[in-house]
């Protein structure tokens, strides 16, 4: 009876593996332009297979600031107000050698790069 159970578990596991459900995958950026991510000897992902989150892209964000600059050291030391709505660029873009964490979508044809490994 136990042998039948083990065989049944193997069959179910095989079916699940064949469906390529969503799973976490790790890779290394080998090229930024065009984007390519090396996963293993059998798989290097091309840009057409990859989607990016903001965590791995350069992007701009609007922020409201309200402060003064520091007092200088010169003879006419003074400050300036720095306030209002300003655009700031966030530099999160991928570079060669980045280790990335991805989610493989159902079917295994698309991968979402969700973050970089922090070293």
Image (spheres, rainbow, N blue to C red):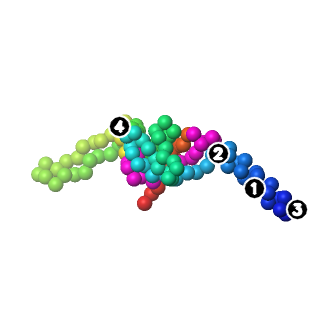
Instruction: Give the mark nearer the N terminus: 2 vs 3.
Output: 3
Examine the residues drawn in magenta and state their main secondary structure: loop
Frontmost of labels 1 and 4 is 1
Q: Is residue 101 visible?
A: no
Q: Which residues are magenta?
A: 93-109
Instruction: Give the mark nearer the N terminus: 2 vs 1.
Output: 1
On the image, the x and y values in percent for residue 42 come to 52, 50
Instruction: Give the mark nearer the N terminus: 1 vs 4.
Output: 1
Using the image, tell me which numbered label, if any, was put on residue 86: 4
Quarter of the image where the N terminus is located: bottom right
Q: Check disc 3 and report the residue beneath it.
A: 1
Question: Mark 4 Cα within 10 Å, few/some/many (few <14, many 20+)?
Answer: few
Q: Check disc 2 and report the residue beneath it.
A: 20
Frontmost of labels 2 and 1 is 1
Q: Check disc 1 and report the residue beneath it.
A: 10
Secondary structure at numbered mark 2: loop
Frontmost of labels 2 and 4 is 2
Q: CA distance from mark 3 to mark 1?
A: 15 Å
Q: CA distance from mark 2 to mark 1?
A: 16 Å
Question: Mark 1 Cα within 10 Å, few/some/many (few <14, many 20+)?
Answer: few
Secondary structure at numbered mark 4: strand
Instruction: Give the mark nearer the N terminus: 2 vs 4.
Output: 2
């Amino acid at each position: 009876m136990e042998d039948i159970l083990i065989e049944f578990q193997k069959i179910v596991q095989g079916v699940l593996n064949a469906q390529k459900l969503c799973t976490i995958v790790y890779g290394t950026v080998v090229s930024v332009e065009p984007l390519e991510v090396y996963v293993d000897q059998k798989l290097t992902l091309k840009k057409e297979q990859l989607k990016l989150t903001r965590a791995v892209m350069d992007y701009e964000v609007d922020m409201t600031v309200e402060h003064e600059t520091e007092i200088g050291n010169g003879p006419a030391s003074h400050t300036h107000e720095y306030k209002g709505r300003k655009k700031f660029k966030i530099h999160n873009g991928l570079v060669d050698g980045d280790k990335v964490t991805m989610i493989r979508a159902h079917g295994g044809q698309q991968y979402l790069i969700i973050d970089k490994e922090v070293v």
